[in-house]
Structure formats: C-alpha cells, structure tokens
Amino acid sequence: MDADELLRRIRRGREHAAAQERAWRERAGSLAVTDPEGAAEAADRARAFEAVLRVLEEIVRPGGDPVRTDGVKQVT
C-alpha cells in the first residue's frame, strides 16, 4: 500500500467516524426524555467516535483547527 492509498483510507475512516458521532449524538438527544440510561450510553458512544475523529483529523491535518462538533469549536 502506498501513501496515497493510506491517506484515502484514513480519510474514509474519518468520514465514517464523523457520521457515527452525529448519529449517536442524535440518538442520545432523542432518548434523553424517554430513556435517560440509553441516552447516556449513546452519548458515551458519540464521545468515543469523537475521539477517533480527532485522532484521524490530527493525522490528516497536523496542528490544524480542532474538530467541530455540533457547530461549536472544541477547545482543548
């Protein structure tokens, strides 16, 4: 595998992590009233995907702006 293929795979993984994070955040929001325990688990999963997304983003764009979640710039 060459560097271009590796970068393509990392970017695909980053896109997948971003989509999963959004999906789990939406699920957490929809469960907040009816199933607080399920909402907490969904929020945990969203945070896990957010961590993966941040790592992959740092690989692709070292030293770039932090990943934005829900339109809010994350501050570290």
Image (cartoon, grey):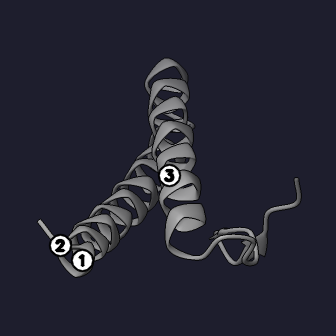
Spatial CA distance of label 3 from label 1 is: 26 Å
SS type, badge 3: helix
Instruction: Give whichever of discs 3 and 2 has the lower sequence position.
Output: 2
Q: Position of residue 12 (x, y in %)?
A: 25, 70
CA neighbours of label 3 inside 10 A, class few (<14), some (14 to 19), many (20+): many
CA neighbours of label 2 inside 10 A, class few (<14), some (14 to 19), many (20+): few
Instruction: Give whichever of discs 3 and 1 has the lower sequence position.
Output: 1
Q: Residue at x 33, y 73 (%)?
A: 11
Residue named by callout 3:
25
Q: Residue furthest left?
A: 1
In the picture, measured across the screen, residue 69 lies left or right of residue 60, that is right
Residue toward you, 19 or 40: 19
Q: Which mark is residue 8?
A: 1
Q: Which mark is residue 63?
A: none
Which one is closest to the eye, mark 3 or mark 2? Answer: 2
State which quarter of the image contains the N terminus.
Answer: bottom left
Above or below for 72 versus 52: below
Q: Position of residue 22 (x, y in %)?
A: 44, 61
SS type, badge 1: helix
Q: Position of residue 36 (x, y in %)?
A: 55, 24
In the picture, measured across the screen, residue 76 lies left or right of residue 73, that is right
Q: What's the amino acid at mark 2? A: Asp
CA neighbours of label 1 inside 10 A, class few (<14), some (14 to 19), many (20+): few
Q: What's the amino acid at mark 1? A: Arg
Q: Residue furthest front?
A: 2
Q: Residue at x 45, y 35 (%)?
A: 45
Q: Which mark is residue 2?
A: 2
Q: Quadrant of residue 23?
A: bottom left
Q: What's the amino acid at mark 3? A: Arg
Q: Residue at x 52, y 63 (%)?
A: 59
